[in-house]
Amino acid sequence: MRTLVTGATGGLGRNAVDALLAQGARVRGTGRDAAQREAFIARGADYVPADLARLTPATLDALLDGVDTVWHCAALSSPWGAYDDFYAANVRATAALAEGAVKRGVRRFVHISTPSIYFDYQHHADLPERYRPARFANHYAATKMLAEEAIQQQASTQHATRFIILRPRGLFGPHDRVVLPRILHLLKLRGGVLPLPRGGAARMDLTYLENVVHAMQCATTADVPSGAAYNITNHAPATLRDLLDQLLGQQLGLRYRIRAVPYPAMAVAARVMEMASAITHREPLLTRYSAAALHYDMTLANDRARIELGYVPPVDMTEGIRRTAHWLREHGNGTWQR
């Protein structure tokens, strides 16, 4: 039997495919880039190009034929964009895959969600999986919650396919296209100066990508209720300033400086950028959500994943940062100097 990995050309998906192939598993990846097919075949994996937001019955058949397990990593993840685009990529695609998995007798469906569903512009420590804000911070969070509800609906109406929801926080590591590339780009734009609210004192969780893959493996075999959701982190919360110092300063040897910026001023600047982007239709350099995520403490409870899934991160934060720095140096993304 095969494991289908959606979002296989993204950071998490690429790590997932590599881990499965290393174990000798049969893997089918999918992504929107048809040009990736030969590269996947060369690595020993099937590849079906597909835009999950516009799935046809024929494409769904091609994706799920002979599949025993689905690792659904694909999503439209951004602090900015049109609601319809988020809904199509995150809700409609997830609902179609989940329904298709049930009809075809897929044994296990691991859905990657997000702790962004908790965010409410307040400080939090050890947030449990049951927490919900009064309103969601952006379209991404709102549609990822709707995607979870689509999963829960399937889980509650049948028993052949077991659904597990994982909410990994702050992914970093090899092939990351989101967190670290943006930080390095900002460093380059601002001549080595990082403007951060509270000078980077926000306390947060991050998760090394290989640990998220390990969590998906745990979720594939654990005897837990269908529809259960779990926070996934590195179990090592720290301040943003300390995490940046470990990666940028100690490991990459970059010369940079953090400049403390008042959060209200940053929030106003973000609002202005969003207003300009509403006219230009280009993603702003900073959004109100992004500014707030850098300001507010937010750490997650991890006892449920540890006890029920048996998830303990195999790669600690120090080693994850070291491996990430090595990957960045090897790929030419960590060499900028002031």
Image (cartoon, grey):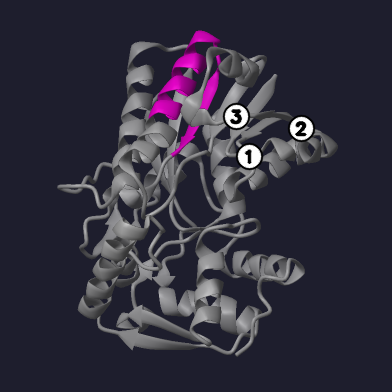
Q: Label 1 near label 2: C-beta < 8 Å?
A: yes
Q: Is residue 196 above or below residue 8?
A: below
Tag nearer the camera, 3 or 2 = 3
Residue 159, percent across and down?
Answer: 42, 12
Q: Which residue is mark 1?
A: 8
Write down the region rendered in magenta.
Answer: 92-112
Tag nearer the camera, 3 or 1 = 3
Crowd class of label 3 (few under 14; some 14 to 19; many from 20; radius 10 Å): many
Q: Is residue 254 above or below residue 7?
A: below
Between disc 3 and disc 1, whose residue precedes? 1
Q: Is residue 54 above or below residue 83?
A: above
Q: Nearer the viewer, residue 194 or 23?
A: 194
Residue 117, percent across and down?
Answer: 30, 47
Q: Is residue 193 above or below residue 224?
A: below
Q: Which residue is mark 2?
A: 45
Q: Nearer the viewer, residue 150 or 321?
A: 150
Q: Is residue 296 visible?
A: no
Q: Label 2 near label 3: C-beta < 8 Å?
A: no
Q: Which residue is mark 3?
A: 50
Q: CA distance from mark 2 to mark 1?
A: 11 Å
